[in-house]
Image (cartoon, rainbow, N blue to C red):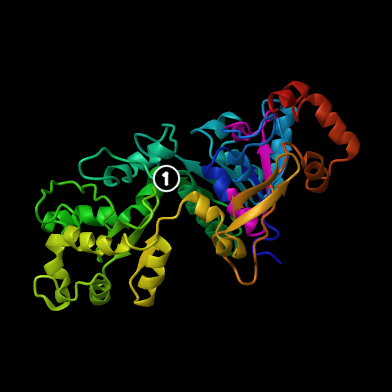
Amino acid sequence: MKALEGVRILDMTHVQSGPTCTQLLAWFGADVIKVERPSGDITRQQLRDLPGVDSLYFTMLNGNKRSITLDTKNPKGRELFARLIQACDVMVENFAPGAIDRMGFPWEKIQELNPQMIYASVKGFGPGPYEDCKVYENVAQCTGGSASTTGFEDGPPLVTGSQIGDSGTGLHLALGIVTALYQREKTGRGQRVLAAMQDGVLNLCRVKLRDQQRLAHGPLKEYPQYPNGTFTDEVPRSGNASGGGQPGWAVRTKGGGPNDWIYVIIQPPGWAPLMKLCGREELIEDSEWATPEARLGKLDRCFEIIEQWTMTRSKFEVMEILNEVNVPCGPILSMKEIAEEPALRATGTVVEVDHPTRGRYLTVGNPVKLSDSPAEVRRSPLLGEHTDEVLEGVLGFSEAEIAELRASGALGDAQDRAAAE
């Protein structure tokens, strides 16, 4: 039995933030019914690497789901949507603010149809002056505190390669949904669940909010601006500084390639083994270097010394050597190296999936491993692949009734299907 077996999700999501949430719930065993407009989720056609097939953008965010097509502008389509609300435990959407209301399904109507419904939404901002604004990944990073604190002091604000705005908020929403399901077991009532992208990014940037408050009491001594730079009343960008209590930095390794780097952290017990490896044993007991406090003002020089040694080894050799002496470190891995890493394949973190039209492709697996409910990663659905199956098995329609629905245009028409190809 899967952890969320028996939970049915009405998936009204598209692009990335919502599909991240519903895919995670599907990995845990929920029956996720992805409702798509007759022309399909827009990401089926975005960033295509192969003509005429679903893009990796879509396939990597919609595994383990069932797809049905539905035209909610059609009266019969809206009736069908209401039936789905009654048949499901959770509805998830990430449309622009007010879109579901304009379809004729405000929260009050949804509660009438299904008092136990958990209605979960991703929005750009929470209630306030910006709540009606549309938000995308990089906008969320910029408004949530990430961009202003990412990059180097003399450079512009930077967005990260990680999708902390979209996928990060989707993960937050999934936790909110599971929590609401747990509470429903006690109360019997559904509820609204909201995850705002600005809020989600800020939650992941909490250490920078910590540092904003620390600034009132003096300089941030672990930042590279200390002691020779200047601090204002705002948290500065700190390059590759660790952001924690232990100094860290990325240093170059042998090879000279763009990813021939390793990140090294200098914990107090690690100073002696690091200096032995670097051939600088005299600095182990030197009062100018021996303590973390003594090193704070010259961390750049500390990492220059370490880099002189790391450049004589590959990043994997450095990792092996430093792990033996309990020095925290991590090689900068390219996506190519990650895709080819056997250990990640073995744990199901990277999974190869077979698809009927595009062939085999790599996707991420469930990052959360449950000992009693292992995830089985399945391919993404074709557009409308499960329409008849859901109408019959979930809503109880006969073949004749399904044919009537199709003739009415409630499920889309030939022109819509052509637009999806």
Whether residue 26 appears in magenta in the rendering, the answer is: yes
For mark 1, give the secondary structure: loop
Q: Quadrant of residue 274?
A: bottom left
Question: Is any part of residue 187 visible from this angle?
Answer: no
Q: Along the horizontal axis of the image, is 344 left or right of 285?
A: right
Q: Position of residue 330 (x, y in %)?
A: 39, 62
Front residue of 378 and 177: 378
Look at the picture and state if 67 lies above or below 262: above
> Which residues lie in the magenta part?
22-46
Q: Position of residue 217 (x, y in %)?
A: 11, 58
Whether residue 305 appears in magenta in the rendering, the answer is: no
Tell me the quadrant of the picture where the N terminus can be found. Answer: bottom right
Look at the picture and state if 264 lies above or below 232: below
Front residue of 84 and 58: 58
Question: Is any part of residue 220 visible from this angle?
Answer: yes
Residue reaching furthest to the right: 400
Look at the picture and state if 49 lies above or below 417: below
Q: Position of residue 88 (x, y in %)?
A: 68, 49
**Residue sitting at 53 percent across and 41 percent down?**
16
Q: Quadrant of residue 370?
A: bottom right
Neighbourhood count class around disc 1 (C-alpha, 10 Å): few under 14, some 14–19, many 20 upward = few
Name the residue tied to disc 1: 161
Residue type for callout 1: Gly
Q: Along the horizontal axis of the image, is 207 left or right of 100?
A: left
Residue reaching furthest to the top: 415
Q: Position of residue 368 (x, y in %)?
A: 55, 63
**Residue sitting at 57 percent across and 34 percent down?**
100
Q: Along the horizontal axis of the image, is 18 left or right of 246?
A: right
Tell me the quadrant of the picture where the C terminus can be found. Answer: top right
